[in-house]
Amino acid sequence: MNRDLDPNAAQRTLFDESNTTAGGFYKLLTASVVPRPIAWVSSRSADGVDNLAPFSFFSVSSTNPPIVQFTTVGGFKNSSDNARATGQFVINIATESMIDLVNATSAGFDEDVNEFEAVGVASEPAAVVDCLRVRDSPVSIECVLHQIIEVGNSQVVMGRVVAVSVATSVAAADGHPDFAKLAPLARLGRTEWALPGEVVERARPR
């Protein structure tokens, strides 16, 4: 049967290069690729200014060696500039209770502004790398710079993980984070955020 004539077929709107600008694809993709975990990245400039900013383009790139990545989009480059200059940064996992602080650090602060102080985020020295981490973040992933890849209007910042600290308050029996206790934030499209929901389990087929 011709699917176009099937009355039960789902109706769709096609977005392509003929009717969508680059900015339009940004909004479309961020509303479609959801939910996206947040890397709350703390870094330090070559001049010693501490920076804190959230990125929702965040994932694991490799497990051996352990590599994580976040992507800066457009002109938001203080974090990537600092990573390039000092070779290190921390990814702090943002939780439900931190939503307003995380959102506040997404503002376009000048490079000489310490966002920890400007927004009122408590900090402490990282365990291995030479910059701050978010004191109340239950999981902090400390990284040394692996590489930065220029992609279109963005920069993919990859860091080799050198230490991960997990608060006992969110740990499961194996010491790893328990999702329900961690209660991580995620971004959706527009101005929407996702809070933790129901968790289901499925064993992988062999």
Image (cartoon, grey):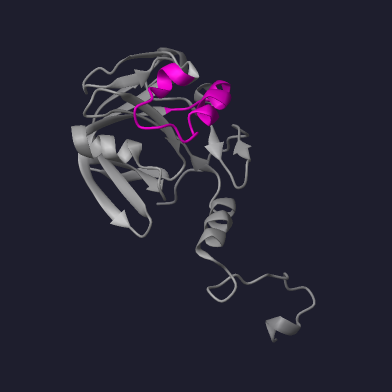
Instruction: Left or right? Give the position of 58 relative to 165.
Output: right
Above/below status of 71 relative to 86: below
Residue 105 sits inside the magenta stretch:
yes
Q: Which of 67 and 70 is in front in this view?
A: 70
- In the image, what residue occupies the spot 69% across and 86% down? 2
Q: Quadrant of residue 130?
A: top left
Q: Which of 198 and 101 is in front in this view?
A: 101
Instruction: Left or right? Give the position of 168 relative to 191.
Output: left
Above/below status of 198 relative to 171: below
- In the image, what residue occupies the spot 48% across and 29% down? 105
**Percent position of residue 178, x then y:** 47, 25
Above/below status of 162 relative to 154: above
- In the image, what residue occupies the spot 50% across and 63% down? 22
The quadrant of the picture occupied by the N terminus is: bottom right
Q: Give the range drawn in magenta.
A: 93-118
Residue 26 sits inside the magenta stretch:
no
